[in-house]
Image (tube, rainbow, N blue to C red):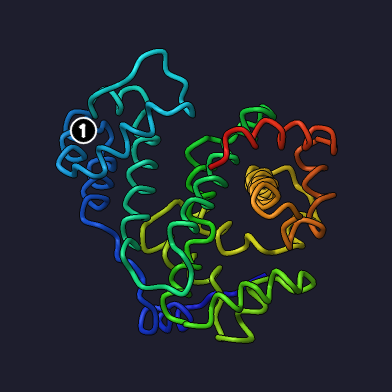
Amino acid sequence: MIQVDDKVLADIDRGFSVPAQPELLLKLQKLMSVSEPDINKIADTISQDVAVSATILKTINSPLYGLARSISDIKKSVRYIGLTGITTLVTSSLLKRSFKDKKASIPLDDFWNNSSNIANSAVFIAKRLKKRISSEKLFTLGLFHDCGIPVMAMKYENYRSTLTQAEQNPSETLPDIEEKAYNVSHATIGYYVATSWRLPIDICQLILRHHEREYLHKIDGSTDQISFAILKLAENIVYLHKHFRESADWPFVRDSVLTVLDIDEDDIADLIEDLNEQLI
C-alpha cells in the first residue's frame, strides 16, 4: 500500500504546478454545507460561470441521461440531477479547465477524453450490473483517478516515455516506475489534488490506491472494493477500444474483478459490445 505523509504532500506543494481549488467550487461547497441547501442560490452561483453552465447543459442533454426533452436552464438541471450530481458536473468541468492551455509532455485533450470515457463507462457498468454505487461517485472516481498524470506531464519533459515504458513492461505498475524515475507517482499527486479539492475521503483513498494490484486479494464486499473493480473494468474496456489490447493492470486484477462483480467473460464481452458504440 502507498504511504503518504505530510512531508510527501509538502514536497508536492512546493515542486509541482497543482491546480488550486477554484473559487466557484468553494462557493458551491459552502452553499451545500448547510442543513437545507437553497437550490435557487446554487443555480444562480453556477449560472455566473458561462462555460461551466454550458458544459452542464451539454451533459444533461446528452444520451447519457436519456431525457425525453431538452433542458435549457441551470435551475431545471439542478432539480433534475440533484445537488450531488450537479456538484459532480461542476467539479469535472472545472478540473478540465484548470489544465486547459497548460504546456505538457502529453496531449491533454486526449487525456481528458480518455478520462471522460472511463468515467462514463464506470457509470454504465454499475447501472448494467445493478450495483448500488452512486453514479456521482463512480463518475468522479473515473474522471479524477489519473488526475496526477497531467501534473506529472507538466513538470517532466520525458514523462511520455515513462508512460510508454509502463505500457511495455506490465510486470511493474506505473506508480512503481514513476517512483524510480521521479521519487513520486501520479497516484500520490492525484491524491493530493483530490484532497485539495475536498473530494470525499473514500474517493481520495481509491485514487491513491487505484494501481494496487493486491487491493482485491482479500475480498470484503465493501463498496470501495466494488468501486475499484468497476474502475479497473472500465479502464480495461476503454483501453481495449483505443489500443486493441488489454491494459497493463488487467491480467493481474481480472479474476478478482470477476469475483467481486459476480460476472464472467461473456458478461464482459456484452459490456464491451455495448460500450464500443458510446465511447469517443
Quadrant (top left, top right, bottom left, bottom right) of the N terminus: bottom right
Camera-nearest residue between 117 and 254: 117
The image quadrant that residue 155 belongs to is bottom left
User: Residue 34 placed where, x, y %?
Assistant: 25, 39
Where does the image place residue 258, in percent across and percent down from the top left?
81, 43
Q: Position of residue 198 (x, y in %)?
A: 37, 56
* Quarter-of-image position of residue 32: top left
93, 105: nearer the viewer: 105
Kindly give the residue lying farthest to the top in the view shown: 68
- Tag 1 residue: 43
| Residue at (23% x, 41% y) in the render | 31
Query: Relative to 194, is 209 on the left or the right?
Result: right
For residue 43, side relative to residue 162 (left or right): left
- Using a 10 Å C-alpha cutoff, classify the residue at mark 1 as few (fewer than 14 neighbours), some (14 to 19) or many (20 or more): many
Name the element at disc 1: helix
Residue 248 placement: quadrant: bottom right
Nearer to me, 161 or 155: 161
Percent position (x, y) of residue 97? Answer: 31, 56
